[in-house]
């Protein structure tokens, strides 16, 4: 049931209450009754009670006040529903953002691990190159020594 339907039903109820008799209890005219008292000699005396019809303006004012109160309650409920919807939407956004952050963190960690493995491989290859460079230096040194020895032998052979 929408808010407009609720307000329409409320307006119809106000209109019906204005259209009914001014005496909602259905009591007509002055009524007589016997008054009892524990005191003096009033026992058995009749008293007349007059029912005064309510003022229609006062009923309209009460109906307007009740309608205003109900509208304020409905407005407060609508605001609460709106706030609840906003809070739920924010919670969904926080969950989505949290999931994205977790995905980014996982992706970042996997990339860091890949970079770490690649760096370790480069360091291993660098160590291999360093050992190969030492071997090449030793071979060059041995080659220079052999050339020097050959040159010395050639010198000795030419001198003799």
Image: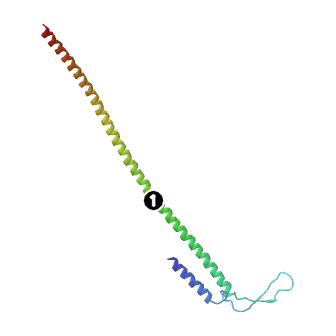
Residue plotted at (37% across, 43% down): 112
Residue plotted at (50% across, 62% down): 87
Q: Nearer the viewer, residue 27 or 89?
A: 89
Question: Compared with residue 73, is residue 104 higher up or lower down, i.e. above or below?
Answer: above
Q: Nearer the viewer, residue 153 or 60?
A: 153
Left or right? Give the position of 66 relative to 93.
right
Question: Compared with residue 46, is residue 136 higher up or lower down, i.e. above or below?
Answer: above
Residue identified by numbered label 1: 93
Residue at the top extreme, as displayed: 160
Query: Image quadrant for the C terminus?
Result: top left
Question: Residue 156 at x, y = what percent?
Answer: 15, 9
Residue at the right extreme, as displayed: 40
Total count of labels: 1
Residue plotted at (66% across, 84% down): 59
Q: Nearer the viewer, residue 114 or 155?
A: 155
Q: Nearer the viewer, residue 66 or 108?
A: 108
Question: Compared with residue 49, is residue 96 higher up or lower down, i.e. above or below?
Answer: above
Left or right? Give the position of 159 relative to 134.
left
The quadrant holding residue 113 is: top left
């Amino acid at each position: 049931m929408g808010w407009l339907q609720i307000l329409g039903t409320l307006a119809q109820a106000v209109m019906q209450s204005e259209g009914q008799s001014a005496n909602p209890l259905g009591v007509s005219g002055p009524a007589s009754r016997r008054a009892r008292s524990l005191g003096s000699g009033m026992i058995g005396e009749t008293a007349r009670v007059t029912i005064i019809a309510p003022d229609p303006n006062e009923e309209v004012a009460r109906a307007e006040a009740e309608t205003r109160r109900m509208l304020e309650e409905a407005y407060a409920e609508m605001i609460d529903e709106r706030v609840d919807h906003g809070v739920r939407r924010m919670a969904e956004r926080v969950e989505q953002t949290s999931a994205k952050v977790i995905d980014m963190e996982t992706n970042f960690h996997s990339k860091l691990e890949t970079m770490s493995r690649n760096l370790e491989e480069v360091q291993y290859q660098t160590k291999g190159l360093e050992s190969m460079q030492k071997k090449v230096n030793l071979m060059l040194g041995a080659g220079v020594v052999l050339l020097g020895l050959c040159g010395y032998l050639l010198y000795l052979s030419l001198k003799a």
